Image (tube, helix red, strand yellow):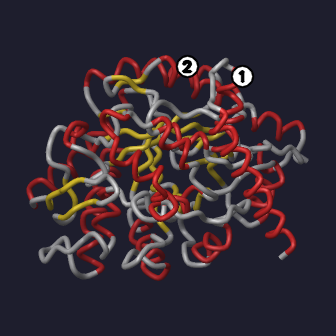
Amino acid sequence: MENKLFTPYQLGPITLRNRFIRSAAFENMCKDNKATQQLEDYHVSVARGGVGMTTVAYCAVEQSGCSFDGQLVVAEATKPSLKHLTDAVHAEGAKVSIQLGHCGNMTHYKTCHCLPVSASAGLNLYSPTLHRGLKVDEIKRIVRKFGEAVDFARECGFDCVEIHCGHAYLISQFLSPRTNRRHDQYGGSFENRCRFMNEVLDAVMQHAGDDMAVVVKTNMWDDCFRGVDFEEGIRICKEIEKHHVHGIILSGGTVSASPMTILGGAMPIKTLAHYMPMKTMWWLKAALLCGGGAMLIPTVPFKELYFMEQAKRFQKEIKDTTLIYVGGVQSGTNCQTIMDEGFELFQLAHVLIKDPDFVNHVKENIGYHAQCGRSNYCVGRMYTIDMKCHHCALRDGEQIPDKLLKEIDKLERKAEKSLEEGTKK
């Protein structure tokens, strides 16, 4: 019998050739907010490597929602490069999705070309930057932009859109009582905090029609003080479900307060600081190298399938929408476990950064392990230059300083020890 992992799946109006989806991990491979040949080549390699669908990340619905210069922005000038990318991915037999979002206060004036915005005014210490609360008419404009972004995605050749409602980006900033201190119809009660998300999803589903698949990434919990807890996370999922989206991706954590909950393991602080430009980020570079890294980015012990326990709690509550697992996929055995636990689809990123052919290897051998050491070197550099595994960088002839290689080795040994301790338990 054919392994269920490699059977087709109907996701709304589209059919995936198998159950593997490349998650929307930020690549930082754009220039002037347009796709580059490097971005296309990476997603083509993942498609050729066997995934059912690959997800291009992250595309801001307008310039104010752009957090890095290397990101996509919905604009007429962006269409040709993305159409070329989607055509190339389709030629390899895979579907292709694009993550649509707005970063809210997770940006700077030079990047978003305005004072950063959020649900409420304040200071984002993690950027750091001052930001202002959105006016109601501005909220309505951004809702329209999300809807129009679906039309943009269709015109670019995408099969699916992923709406980012998690990780402390703008929609998440409205959902969380930690960042939403409004006293109007968009703040206060749970229903009011969900209003912006619900309006966005109404617009998205209207524009999606009957030919575009829609999935939503949401937090099961924020894992930070005064953030969304599990109880509210389930209630938010039930709100999302009301819109008849085709899939819900169950994630957790916030980029501003608990980033390693999202990623698992430790952040390579020396690597992160090394690639930061001194001219524009000297203050953060200095803070990281002076011992502030461990406080700003606390480690979360890594374990394979690290969101499984939490995701199964949501599985008991959400019955009418496809739940998409994400988090800690390292091997074919992990993939089989996800199927055995009743999840029809799952996303993965780290292993596809190291090994774009991962899916084909698993098809040949269900016991295949990608040997990703989870040093998060790929994350440490992707916010400044591009997303790349250190193994691939060395193979391509890049020079990585010895101090960074030592850090990578130390973190990989730490992750291995964490895995061993978890296995014993």
Q: Secondary structure at mark 2?
A: helix
In the foreground, 227 or 300? 300
Residue at x-position 37% and y-position 35% = 278
Q: Position of residue 207 (x, y in %)?
A: 31, 44
Q: Position of residue 93 (x, y in %)?
A: 65, 27
Q: Give the answer, above or below, for where 228 lies relative to 324.
A: below
Q: Residues within 10 Å of mark 1 (few under 14, many from 20)?
A: few
- Give the amino acid type for the residue marked by disc 1 in the picture: Arg
Q: Residues within 10 Å of mark 2 (few under 14, many from 20)?
A: some
Q: Which residue is mark 2?
A: 88
Q: Nearer the viewer, mark 1 or mark 2?
A: 1
Q: Which residue is mark 1?
A: 395
Residue at x-position 74% and y-position 57% = 414
**360 left or right, relative to 209:** right
**161 left or right, relative to 424:** left
Q: Quadrant of residue 309?
A: bottom right
Q: How far separated are the C-alphas under marks 1 and 2? A: 25 Å
Residue at x-position 57% and y-position 72% = 319
In the foreground, 283 or 61? 283
